[in-house]
Amino acid sequence: MAAGNTADTPRTLRWRIDARLMPLAITACLFFALVAAGSMLYQNFLAPQVFLNLLVDNAFLCIVAVGMTFVILTGGIDLSVGAIVALNTMISASLVQKHGVSPFAAIPLVLAVGAAFGLLHGVLIQYLRLQPFIVTLAGMFLARGLAFLIGTESIAVDHPVYQELASARIPLGFGSLSIGAAVACVVVAGGIWLAHATPFGRTVYAVGGDEAAARLMGLRVDRTVVGVYLLSGFCSALAGVVMTLYMLSGYSLHGSGLELDAIAAVVIGGTLLRGGIGYVSGTFVGVMILGIIQTLISFDGTLSSWWTKIVAGALLLAFCLLQRFLEVRSPAR
């Protein structure tokens, strides 16, 4: 009997390791398959700047998706991110354009607003035991409503600081990145470090795996969950700053549907919706997959841009089915 248990243990361990890495591996394979298809169908598709533009055009989505990854790793959800992005574009544009506030004062303020939204969500969810879906849905309505209270029309930003930051490019020798794309790279690197090299990150995975067990281990579960939503709110505010630079405007409808794109990127990137398994690096690849689908449609020139949503929906459904398959096949914990 003992020998049988000893023989089964390595197989069980190997399956659990494979189950955790399989969605990420499939995501990477899908990305390279799309790249290969694009290179065969379209000339100059493999130009370095084409791939750099994937990050330039999706920098704000990438930043939001990093924060969303941590939320989903705990088994939660945040539906307010797109509305917080819109609110912060409106706050910063209104302060700078209409009230003459310096961008160096406006940007920290909007970051604080986003963090405050996240903190409120975390406290309501963890200490009052409210459902994340309902709390963040309420936050979405509140943030979007506040954005419309500031103004219903787009506010163009022509402040010299914003203009210079928007037009600035970081040369790489084989192409260039915008300031927003560079910020997104820093956020991704910081997210990877936070998830895998800090006690906070280890607690996030523990909470997503089994919150009760994490409490029995003496981990700071409540602080971690609140911190996760605070991080998501901060990332949303930062994405709002990047979107303001990208669009050079504030608008109440900016970020519409961004929360769904972020969730799709996280799930396509291999993070399980039940929490506990996932990688920030996978989320980054998920964002790049959504971006490369948009690029393929642009290169084709005859397809509607709505095909991006159709393909993203199909991929999301496929990855949800994959997650369900992994849950059924994985041994009991």
Image (cartoon, rainbow, N blue to C red):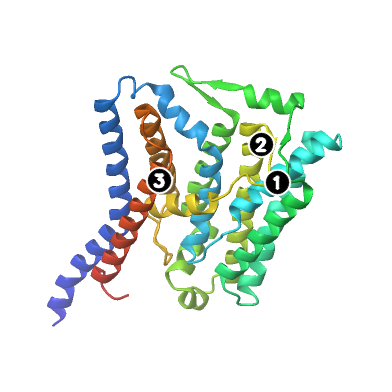
Residue occupying image coordinates x 71% and y 28%: 162
Residue 11: x percent and y percent?
A: 18, 66
Q: Which mark is residue 274?
A: none
Q: Is residue 218 visible?
A: yes
The amino acid marked with disc number 1 is Asn
Residue 6: x percent and y percent?
A: 17, 73
Disc nearer the start of the sequence (3/2): 2
Taking depth in this image into account, of 49 and 25 the one nearest to the observer is 49
Q: Circle 3 — which element? A: helix
Q: Are marks 3 and 2 in contact (CB under 8 Å)?
A: no
Q: Which mark is residue 244?
A: 2
**Is the residue marked by circle 2 packed among few (<14), some (14-19), or many (20+) residues within 10 Å?**
many
Q: State the separation of the CA atoms marked 1 and 3.
A: 25 Å
Taking depth in this image into account, of 107 and 85 the one nearest to the observer is 85
Q: Is residue 220 visible?
A: no
Residue occupying image coordinates x 64% and y 58%: 230
Disc nearer the start of the sequence (1/2): 1
The amino acid marked with disc number 3 is Gly
Location of the N terminus by quadrant is bottom left
